[in-house]
Image (cartoon, grey):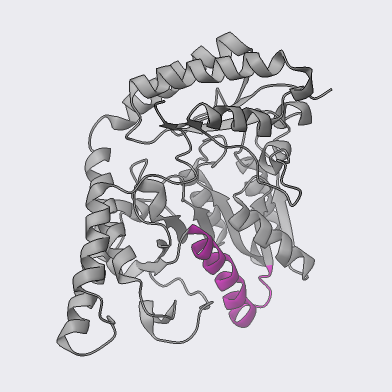
Amino acid sequence: MQRIYLDSNATTEPAPEVVEAVACAMRDTWANPSSVHRAGGEAKRVVELAREAVARLIGCQERELVFTSGGTEGANLAIRGSLEHFGAAEPGRRVLVTTKFEHSAVRELAQKLEERGTEVVWLPAAAGASGVADLDRLESLLAARGDEIALVSLMWANNETGSITDIARAGAICRDAGVRFHTDATQWVGKMPTDLAALQIDLASFAAHKFHGPKGVGGIYVRRNVRIAPQTYGGPQERERRGGTENVPAIAGMGVAADLARVWLSGDGAARGAALRDRFEQTVVSATEGLVHAGNAPRLWNTTNIGFPRLEAEAILLLLSERGLFASAGAACSSGSLDPSPVLLAMGVEPEVAHGSIRFSLSRDTTESDCTEAAQRVIAAIHRLRSSTSSVVL
């Protein structure tokens, strides 16, 4: 049976060139890049060449890029680092502004900080939008309380629906109010053209494995003259913003992945991917009466989230997996079943629909035949489950 992978917002398959770069670094440039001898210098050169490649991909200066272990660490560094910086430099700035439909790297951190006494303002969704903050409300909030706010953190593209935030406007609103702005760009970088120098963004976090790079490595863009408190101590690496010996093989792979993504973005791959996504989505919805979340909003070319009312996402995913089709839904809870996505619930999706919502996300390697066959497998699975009363949520 042909295996079809439509879970690329979770991770992507490393490109062959990336695998080779990682293996080469493991084999040949395994020295500590902080060492002063020639072997250390060779490893350091690998790191800096990768830094140049990633900086080209996102449109920033090399010195504005900090390598991290991934998007989660990057988001934590941006948020914790900003709050701690202002706690020492400007104690009056103590408020964090974000939304309840952020990725858990931001949302759960904000919830934990709130429990510990940080004031968090949760922006609502824009009217009629799935996973996009109300920027009019943000503008009003900053006009009233801008001098109290340490950081605004909004994701560029929603990981569950693909909905795109107008980051240019969000950044401009924050800059006009003199408020620092962070974006979780994990689902954006490598999939869409990025020029951070042209935008009013202070901090942006992202991960290599979302654009066919290795897991365990990512980056955070820190605009020149923006100060953040380090969250990892133990060395002067990354301009003293992130201590610890650099993961040279993963960084090397990230550099290659960045170059490959930049070449791909220069073509029409995103347009072709969107056409495949739309055809898949229309086929499934017309045959199953599924409900598309964020169907009319600007979206990433690769993402669709379809709700199948009164069905359980866990049952759908298991049946699809048995048929060689891999997708995703909400986060697994401790009981082993799937809770409805808190992101979808925060967007106002009805629980009976959120319970049966599945995210399908393409990669640049997804083919037309993949999408055609995947649609047929989804249709067959939904029809089978709806004929079985044990799979229906009453």
Q: Is residue 95 left or right of residue 365?
A: right
229 or 279: nearer the eye? 279
Quarter location, residue 50: bottom left
Q: Residue furthest left?
A: 38
| Residue at figure coordinates x 27%, y 59% from the top left | 255
Q: Is residue 56 visible?
A: no
Question: Which SS does the magenta portion mostly show?
Answer: helix
Residue 210 among those drawn in magenta: no
| Residue at figure coordinates x 65%, y 35% from the top left | 126
Q: Is residue 202 left or right of residue 133?
A: left
Q: Is residue 165 left or right of residue 92?
A: left
Tell me if residue 267 comes above or below residue 373 in the rendering. below
Q: Say which quadrant the C terminus sits in.
A: top right
* Residue 133 in the image, given as x and y percentages of width and height: 62, 42
Which residues are drawn in magenta? 71-94
Q: Is residue 154 visible?
A: yes
Residue 90 among those drawn in magenta: yes
Tell me if residue 66 comes above or below residue 389 in the rendering. below
Q: Say which quadrant the N terminus sits in.
A: top left
Tell me if residue 382 comes above or below residue 157 in the rendering. above
Q: Residue furthest bottom?
A: 36
Q: Residue furthest top?
A: 287
Q: How many marks?
A: 0
Quarter location, residue 204: bottom left
257 or 378: nearer the eye? 378
* Residue 267 in the image, given as x and y percentages of width and height: 23, 33
* Residue 349 in the image, given as x and y percentages of width and height: 72, 30
